[in-house]
Image (cartoon, rainbow, N blue to C red):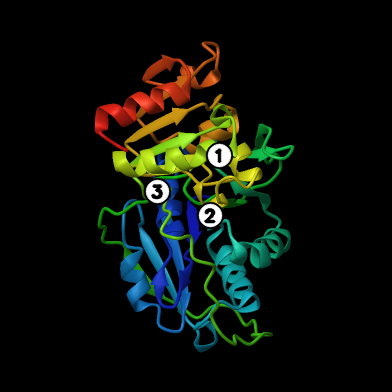
Amino acid sequence: MSGILILAEHRRGTLRDATLEAIGAAGTLTAALGGPVTVLVIAADPAPLAKAVSVGAVDEVITVARPDAATYEPHVYEAVLRSVIAARSPALVLMPHGVDSFSLAPAVAIGEGLGFATDVFGVAVEEGQVVATRAGYNEKVFVEIDFPGRAGVLLTLRGGSFAPETAPASPAVSAIDAGDGKARSKHLDWRDPPATGGIDIPGSPFILSIGRGVGDEANVAQFLELADGLGATLGCSRPIADNGWLPKARQVGQSGQLAAKCNLYIAMGISGSVQHQWGMKHVENIVAINKDPEASIFTIARYGIVGDMLEIAEELRKQKGIQ
């Protein structure tokens, strides 16, 4: 078995960013794993999506036109994906981790006898074998998983964990007939998730985050004003969101959001747990403010200030003329 097979995920005719992230992950593994990178596109009209996945390290795009795949239907996808896996024998199959994978990936892994791990945020190849990293014990530890005795492995990748690939490529495109699965469900309507009020942690270039050091819910409002005055997005650590002081959409960390496009991150009153650090792992410029000189956050910060976050916030407001 060799090569990497990626299942493209799309909604309403638009490719999801998670697929580009999977292609980005594949690009980092090809040298060690060997073989081609192939993307499988299943849709009523796969041609536009085939063009969208022609990026990065992709060597081939396989398209399967199924009228019953206009919307996601797990039994159709399972039949097609298993057929392609049986024909191509990839060493690694990658899928975005989300509602689609919940209904599809376990059945495919069991049916094809593949090693299997979900919600993976790190992938490596050691001595020719795939090693996946995911969280365990309610996000308290990182776990490395290998797959002895398995020729192939299927992984679902946590969104935002890998840099999306966007560089254009010119892969071969093959249209095939695959899978005899029949749709067993009917799509009725789309229901969009609740609005986040314009909060976009993953897409924000400048984030000011607050943690336990804020002390009291009554102090949170001043940091909303400070972040706005500085042109930053206000984020927070898990305890702030768990207490209901700020909405979950503002939480940075493994059980929250990844600061994927952040260039400057100011962490105020945040101790720097492993879970929170994961949400900041792509950030090059981190400024940490904490009263505890031994706080873990200082180990990853470019600049550190030992002091009271409330006092420093007040000084920032004076310097910027924020009332």
Mark 1 surroundings: few (<14), some (14-19) or many (≥20) residues within 10 A: few
The CA span between labels 2 and 1 is 45 Å
Which of the numbered marks, if any, corresponds to residue 24?
Answer: 3
Q: Amino acid at mark 1?
A: Ala
Q: Are marks 2 and 1 in contact (CB under 8 Å)?
A: no
| Residue ID at (63%, 37%) | 239
Which of labels 1 and 3 is toward the front?
Answer: 1
* Residue at disc 2, secondary structure: strand
Residue 126 visible here = no
Q: Which mark is residue 94?
A: 2
Q: The C terminus is located in which quarter?
A: top left
Residue at 55% from the left image edge and 47% from the top image edge = 246
Q: Under tag 1, what secondary structure? A: helix
Please tell me the numbered disc located at residue 218: 1
Q: Earlier in the sequence, mark 1 or mark 3?
A: 3
Horizontal and vertical percent position of residue 72: 56, 76
Residue 272 in the image, given as x and y percentages of width and height = 54, 26
Residue 317, placed above or below residue 147: above
